[in-house]
Amino acid sequence: MFLKKKKDPGLVLLPVTNVDIEQVRERCRALVRKRAMISAGVAAVPVPGIDMVADLSSFASMVEDINRAFGLTPEQIELLQPRMRVAAYEAVGALGGMLVGKLVTRELVIKLLQKSGAKLAAKSAAKVVPLAGQIASAAIGFALFRQMGYQHVEACTRVAREVAGKVGDKVPTPPA
């Protein structure tokens, strides 16, 4: 009468050892750098506004990929054992960034991008100056995208370590 939820084999479990967490962290940081380079390439195109559209969709996709890699999508958290699920939600609430463990929506990404308003304005204004402005816009776009991506990776790393620490395997935080 009651059916068990079928587990999706494509879902990744929450990493629980320090080695696993560090490996996922480094893979995600590489993903951020790759996507930031793409963002910079799009920002160099002299069409105003195209970079914002591309950044929104690329950033939202990247955040979902990072959450999935850390096992922190809403679907993955729901598949955890009850004790780990509670620990994950507590850690997300206490340590996580705005996008950890949440369904990423366009509105949520726009809200996050608004926090970086001055850099976005400089990026858009730089496009007015031919060539040098495009280069400056690309550099600002790369730096902004990378910074926001790295912040999300670090938030996910903190949440994963906190959850791992609460479920038994005390995972020490590596020195900075």
Image: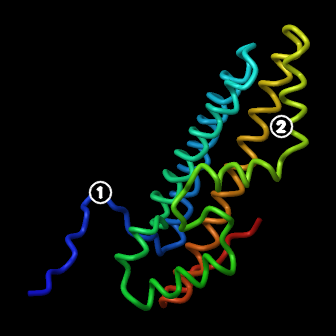
Residue 120 is marked as 2
Q: Residue at x 86, y 22 (%)?
A: 136
Q: Secondary structure under badge 2?
A: helix
- Quick one: quadrant of the N terminus? bottom left
Residue 153 is marked as none
- Picture quadrant where residue 36 is located: top right
How many numbered marks are there?
2
Of the pair 156 and 124, the residue shown nearer to us: 124
Q: Secondary structure under badge 1?
A: loop
Residue 46: percent from the left, percent from the top? 75, 13
Three-letter amino acid code at the position of disc 2: Leu
Relative side of 21 to 121, left or right: left
Please tell me how crowded label 1 is: few (under 14), some (14-19), or many (20+) other residues with Cα within 10 Å: few
Three-letter amino acid code at the position of disc 1: Gly
- Picture quadrant where residue 162 is located: bottom right
Relative side of 137 to 90, left or right: right
Is the residue 90 above or below the residue 79 in the image? below
Residue 3: percent from the left, percent from the top? 14, 81
Please tell me how crowded label 2 is: few (under 14), some (14-19), or many (20+) other residues with Cα within 10 Å: some
Q: Residue at x 57, y 80 (%)?
A: 171
In the picture of the structure, the residue carrying the numbered disc 1 is 10
Residue 167: percent from the left, percent from the top? 48, 88
